[in-house]
Image (cartoon, rainbow, N blue to C red):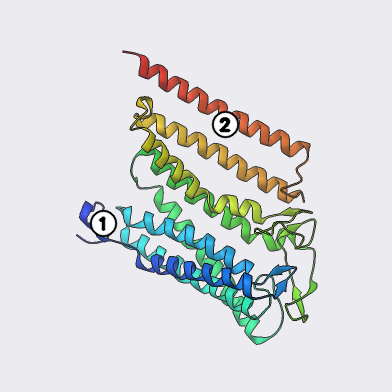
């Protein structure tokens, strides 16, 4: 049976593994260890943060995302060869992009928004930008192709479709960071005190810096990295919710109906998507995540109440149906 055959046996599904993505997971795991050591052993800083903070964050993020794709792609039954190719493209471009971030960190300078005219940086920025397009394109095509096939039950299928779709939206938001947040060229210092020209920033209404611990999200203005993170890792949230519901179904009788689990996953998807929209709206208004105004609190409360009410109604209806002889 070829890889493009619509249906594969269980043995073939177990035997197939996406080696490039697993190589990426291994490489990013190694990066997490190296960057973690660098945080302790290397005192160089960029904007009052260790030069190894950004490689560490990217390493952790790509371990999670690549592991999710490596788990997902072998389970697909249609266009498996195409999906394998897209996964490989994601792994290759991701390794190149994060590799550039690591090299720039080791050099004590910036990877993002750096427009210095030295040859290495100029060539690296071209490759870096191309890789970003590759990551987005591969994820977008995987999201589109997931619309035409089923993976597991209805709840898991919709969790994967919505998760990949919202992840793509989070990536797309990152592509607008430079244009939306930029206030003009500015000069900062690298880890050695040398001037670096930056065009673009993550912050809205305030320059980068003055960030929270670990994430470095701005505490004085809006930061588009917040909704970018929320969207990017939505697939892990949705799949985890689907797996938890499936596990609970063994003990909770009213959860054994596939339709009930699908309804609950739909509510999780809607609530989380509202959170993504809220954090995007908050960031674009130049408002820090940790300093929400009254409007943000009202929308957040309405989202939480609406989500919980919808879940309560769905659960109540499912229990009533279960109680009927």
Q: Seen from this angle, which residue lies furthest bottom?
A: 119
Q: Secondary structure at mark 1?
A: helix
Residue 242 in the image: above or below residue 59: above
Q: Which residue is painted at 43% across and 59% down in the image?
A: 67
Residue 184 vertical placement versus 144 (above, below): below
Count neighbours of disc 1 (C-alpha within 10 A) and say few if under 14, some if 14 to 19, many if 20 or more: few
Badge 1 is on which residue?
14
Of residue 244 and residue 222, the one placed in the foreground of this image is 244
* Label disc, if present, on residue 130 of the rendered structure: none
| Residue beneath the point at 61% across and 45% down | 276
> Would you say 199 lies left or right of 94 here?
right
In x, y percent, where is residue 260? 40, 29
Provide residue 151's location: percent of width, then percent of height. 34, 46
For the N terminus, which image quadrant?
Answer: bottom left
Quarter of image, res 15? bottom left
**Spatial CA span between label 1 and label 2:** 37 Å
Q: Is residue 236 above or below residue 260?
A: below
Q: Secondary structure at mark 2?
A: helix
**Residue that appears at 58% across and 75% down:** 102
Callout 2: 10 Å neighbours few (<14), some, many (20+)?
some
Question: In the image shown, does 36 or 171 lie closer to the viewer?
Answer: 36
Q: From the viewer's perspective, is residue 253 above or below residue 238?
A: above
Q: Position of residue 274 (x, y in %)?
A: 60, 40
- Can you name the residue that lies furthest to the left here? 1
Which residue, given by chain and number where applicable, does mark 2 sit on? 307
151 and 25: which is toward the camera: 25
The residue located at (63%, 34%) in the rendering is 303
Q: Quadrant of the C terminus?
A: top left
């Amino acid at each position: 049976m070829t890889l493009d055959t619509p249906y594969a046996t269980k043995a073939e599904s177990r035997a197939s593994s996406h080696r490039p993505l697993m190589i990426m997971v291994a490489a990013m795991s190694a990066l997490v260890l190296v960057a973690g050591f660098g945080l302790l052993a290397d005192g160089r800083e960029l904007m009052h943060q260790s030069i190894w903070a950004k490689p560490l964050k990217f390493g952790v993020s790509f371990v999670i995302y690549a592991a999710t794709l490596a788990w997902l792609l072998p389970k697909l039954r249609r266009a498996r060869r195409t999906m394998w190719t897209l996964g490989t493209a994601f792994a290759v471009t991701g390794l190149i992009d994060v590799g550039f971030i690591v090299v720039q960190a080791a050099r004590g300078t910036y990877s993002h928004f750096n427009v210095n005219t030295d040859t290495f940086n100029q060539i690296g920025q071209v490759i870096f930008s191309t890789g970003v397009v590759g990551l987005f394109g591969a994820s977008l095509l995987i999201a589109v192709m997931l619309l035409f096939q089923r993976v597991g039950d209805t709840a898991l299928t919709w969790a994967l479709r919505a998760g990949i779709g919202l992840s793509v939206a989070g990536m797309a938001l990152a592509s607008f960071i430079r244009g939306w947040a930029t206030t003009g060229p500015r000069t900062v210092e690298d880890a050695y005190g040398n001037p670096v020209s930056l065009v673009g920033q993550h912050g809205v209404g305030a320059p980068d810096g003055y960030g929270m611990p670990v994430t470095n999200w701005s505490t004085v203005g809006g930061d588009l990295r917040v909704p970018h993170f929320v969207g990017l890792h939505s697939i892990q949230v949705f799949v985890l919710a689907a797996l938890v519901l499936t596990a609970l179904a063994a003990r909770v009788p009213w959860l054994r109906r596939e339709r009930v689990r699908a309804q609950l996953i739909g509510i999780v998807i809607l609530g989380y998507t509202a959170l993504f929209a809220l954090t995007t709206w908050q960031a674009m208004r130049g408002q820090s995540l940790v300093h929400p105004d009254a409007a943000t609190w009202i929308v957040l409360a309405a989202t939480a109440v609406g989500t919980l009410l919808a879940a309560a109604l769905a659960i109540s209806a499912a229990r009533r149906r279960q109680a009927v002889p």
